[in-house]
Image (cartoon, rainbow, N blue to C red):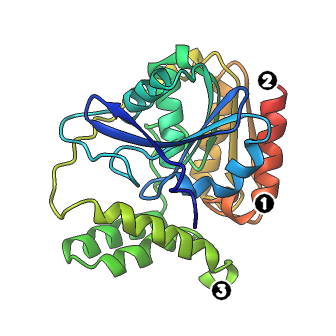
Amino acid sequence: MNGDVDVRFLPSSDGDLAYLDTGSGDPVVLLHAGYVDHRFWHEQISALAAGFRVIAPDARGHGRSANASRPFRWADDLAELLRGVDAGPAVLVGLSMGGMIATDTVLEHPELVRAVVTCGAVTGDFRYTDAWHEEIRAEYARTLAAGDLKGWLDAFVRVVPGWQRTMDDIDPEIPRRLREMALRTMSKHTPGERDWLVPVTDSWPRVPKIDVPVLAINGGLEPADLLAAAERLAREVPDGRAEVVEGVGHYPNLEKPEVFNTLLLDFLRAL
């Protein structure tokens, strides 16, 4: 999987932040899911770069970006990056952790955001409550406590099919790519190291103040609580819309990239 050769680095207030910067036009920022890196967006980068300036960072502690050595917020890192590369206001497109970063950033740094696309995420206040996700979280904790990285990676890629399918239903290239990226990120860290992340809180009460267009794209096989929360987000902002990609789970950009790209490009072209 290519994507490292063109990576640039921005010296931040706490180490270098890695990012890809390609194409030209209005800026679109692609914010990856947890544990992976900017290569997560491979199919979207190539589709968008023909008409937009595409910036795809590695979040702090992920990929080739520095780990934290003091308290930080991902939204502040993103704001520092956007100012550093003169890319605001930008459209923020985020999946899972990246979707949370997108909504955190529009709440904390609204002047830098032109529009928001979330996927597999809503705001930092949202938590999956279904039994299947609870089981996955328990497996994460068990394997990390045992120093079992292979076991952790096995649990991590179970999120691809989700609770309604098996790995036999999935293109094996998708979990292979996710494992490769997650292994690099996890290898940057040590067991028991301090978590310096400061969460952005009190998100839901501030959602109605988001005065830019918001598109929520989610896989139809996501749990009902996530789909309901995405509908709530689209309903509570002044200009919001929710779309469902049927037949896929947490990663519609990987499972049905053509459908995802069409929804995304239609949204961007209408801004």
Q: Up-down: is 181 above or below 233?
A: below
154 lies left or right of 227: left
Q: Is residue 108 visible?
A: yes
Q: Marks 2 and 3: CB-CB under 8 Å?
A: no
Under mark 3, the amino acid is: Asp
The residue wearing badge 2 is 271
Q: Nearer the viewer, residue 186 or 220?
A: 186
Q: Residues within 10 Å of mark 2 (few under 14, many from 20)?
A: few
Q: Quadrant of residue 189?
A: bottom left
Q: Up-down: is 18 above or below 110?
A: below
Element type where label 3 sits in the image: helix
The residue wearing badge 1 is 246
Q: Position of residue 48 (x, y in %)?
A: 74, 43
Q: Quadrant of residue 87?
A: top right
Q: Marks 2 and 1: CB-CB under 8 Å?
A: no
The residue wearing badge 3 is 168
